[in-house]
Image (cartoon, grey):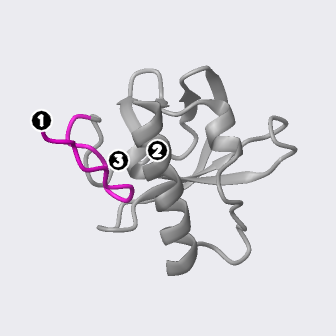
Amino acid sequence: MSMHAFDPWTYRATSGYTEGNDLNGYKIAATDGDIGKVDGATDQPGIAGLVVDTGPWIFGRKVLLPAGVVERVDHDDEKVYVDRTKDQIKAAPEYDPDTGADDAYRTRLGGYYDDTYRTGM
């Protein structure tokens, strides 16, 4: 039985995301409810991810979601479904929109979501 390797910074082939899709303004749905809207996105190979404005949910904090947690994109509803719970997303290493994501932060965040992938599946 081979374990599927989790690549945090690449969209899954099955997600319905294709390069160049503009996801800004799309709602983000965790497994247990909506968490906010896409406020920025990158699909650069190896560092693809979504910056999410959580609004009142985490006191206006923004979170960075690695592309690998995206389960599917519904373009009709303008919604992005991720396969993590609100608590898992809330507990992720904090994102600072002022400094952005450097390599060290990406490594830490990717590792965090890799752990939740193994334990949550």
Of 40 and 92, the residue lying toward us: 92
Q: SS at mark 2?
A: loop
Q: CA distance from mark 2 to mark 3?
A: 6 Å
Q: Is residue 44 above or below residue 41?
A: below
The amino acid at mark 2 is Leu
Instruction: From the image, tell me which residue sits under label 1.
Output: 1
Q: Which residues are magenta?
A: 1-14
**Quarter of the picture holding the N terminus:** top left
The amino acid at mark 1 is Met
Instruction: From the image, tell me which residue sits under label 3.
Output: 21
The amino acid at mark 3 is Asn
Within 10 Å of disc 1 (Cα), the crowding (few <14, some 14-19, many 20+) is few
Q: Main secondary structure of the magenta part?
A: loop
Residue depicted at 36% across the width and 31% down the height: 72
Residue depicted at 36% across the width and 60% down the height: 43
Residue mark closest to the camera, 3 vs 1: 1
Instruction: From the image, tell me which residue sits under label 2.
Output: 23
Mark 2 and mark 1 lie on one chain; the one further toward the N terminus is: 1
Q: SS at mark 1?
A: loop
